Image (tube, helix red, strand yellow):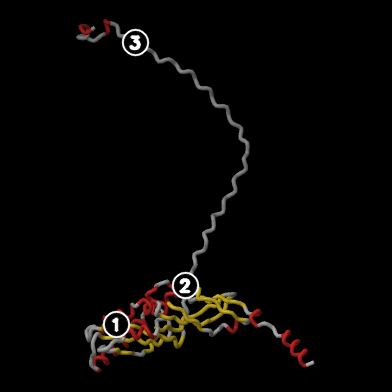
């Protein structure tokens, strides 16, 4: 009897995977809502808070950015789409190890900045010199990096700031600012974390499809009585030029006749 009950109970167990539905993960507005992948769930409310990681190569196809990983967290669900927000980025450990060589100095920094639209972001840049430098120079370089990153973040929105990190524009700005103290061979923003979200960027305006202009209905064809065209008048023959009588010729022309 016990075996029959266990078999009957096993039959009543429902397959959880059959109740799950696949949802599309979409990137935020700063990445033009590109598709990040898919995730299954039996309840849309369980998607909120899930974090997914993709590389920049997956988004842009740029092979040189394959070492940069972007993190996105699901913010809300809209239909079959799970909309995400940017929560940070990171670089692979093997890429950072390749940058650090012997007889070089690596200067790390951790700084909290606030963007123009109120996003609180923790940024961790690093500067690598071509040779070893003193600790006093490292302190000056950290001070310059702190001021540079703070000034750039305060003048940019979160989308512009993240794009500057990924493209390397922020690293170039830091390198130029540190050059008077000591030439820096490489600058990288190795990690960033969003601590508090500010204003969300407005949704991108997709151009609406051009609708053809409404054609005005053609007027119905009404038969119009044509007036008889007037008959052309017969052409009158032009009068032949009258010959001048010899007596009428002017004096002096008689010899020519």
The kind of secondary structure element at disc 1 is: strand
The numbered dot on residue 54 is: none
Q: Nearer the viewer, residue 37 or 111?
A: 37
Task: Tell me the residue at 72%/86% (across/down).
Answer: 10
Q: Earlier in the sequence, mark 2 or mark 3?
A: 2
Task: Tell me the residue at 49%/69% (across/down).
Answer: 205
Q: How far apart are marks 2 and 1 (CA)?
A: 30 Å
Q: Distance between the residues labelled 2 and 3?
A: 93 Å
Residue for badge 2: 32
Residue for badge 3: 242
Q: Which of 21 and 169 is in front in this view?
A: 21
Q: Is residue 39 left or right of residue 7?
A: left
- Residue 86: where, in percent of width, then height? 46, 81
Q: Is the residue 158 above or below the residue 132 in the image?
A: above
The quarter of the image holding the C terminus is top left
- Quarter of the figure with residue 115: bottom left
Q: Is the residue 124 above or below the residue 225 in the image?
A: below
Mark 2 Cα-neighbour bin, 10 Å: few <14, some 14–19, many ≥20: few
Residue for badge 1: 186
Mark 1 Cα-neighbour bin, 10 Å: few <14, some 14–19, many ≥20: some
Label total for image:
3
Q: Which of 194 and 17 is in front in this view?
A: 17
The quarter of the image holding the N terminus is bottom right
- Residue 216: where, in percent of width, then height? 57, 50
Point out the frontmost of discs 2 and 3.
2
């Amino acid at each position: 009897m016990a075996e029959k009950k266990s078999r009957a109970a096993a039959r009543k167990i429902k397959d959880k995977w059959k109740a799950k539905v696949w949802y599309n993960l979409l990137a935020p507005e700063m990445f033009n809502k590109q598709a990040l992948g898919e995730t299954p769930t039996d309840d849309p409310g369980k998607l909120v808070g899930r974090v997914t990681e993709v590389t920049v190569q997956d988004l842009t196809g740029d092979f040189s950015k394959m070492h940069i990983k972007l993190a996105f967290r699901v913010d809300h669900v809209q239909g079959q789409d799970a909309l995400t927000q940017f929560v940070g980025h990171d670089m692979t450990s093997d890429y950072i190890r390749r940058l650090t060589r012997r007889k070089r100095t690596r200067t790390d920094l951790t700084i909290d900045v606030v963007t123009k639209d109120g996003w609180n972001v923790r940024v961790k840049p690093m500067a690598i010199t071509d040779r070893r430098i003193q600790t006093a120079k490292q302190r000056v370089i950290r001070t310059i990096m702190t001021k540079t990153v703070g000034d750039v973040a305060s003048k940019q929105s979160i989308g512009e700031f993240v794009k500057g990190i990924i493209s390397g524009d922020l690293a170039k700005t830091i390198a130029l600012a540190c050059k008077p103290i000591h030439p820096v061979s490489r600058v990288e923003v190795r990690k960033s974390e969003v601590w508090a979200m500010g204003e969300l960027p407005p949704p991108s305006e997709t151009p609406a499809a051009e609708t053809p202009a409404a054609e005005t209905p053609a007027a119905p064809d009404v038969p119009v009585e044509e007036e008889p065209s007037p008959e052309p008048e017969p052409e009158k023959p032009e009068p032949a030029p009258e010959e001048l009588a010899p007596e009428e010729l002017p004096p002096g022309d008689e010899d020519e006749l």
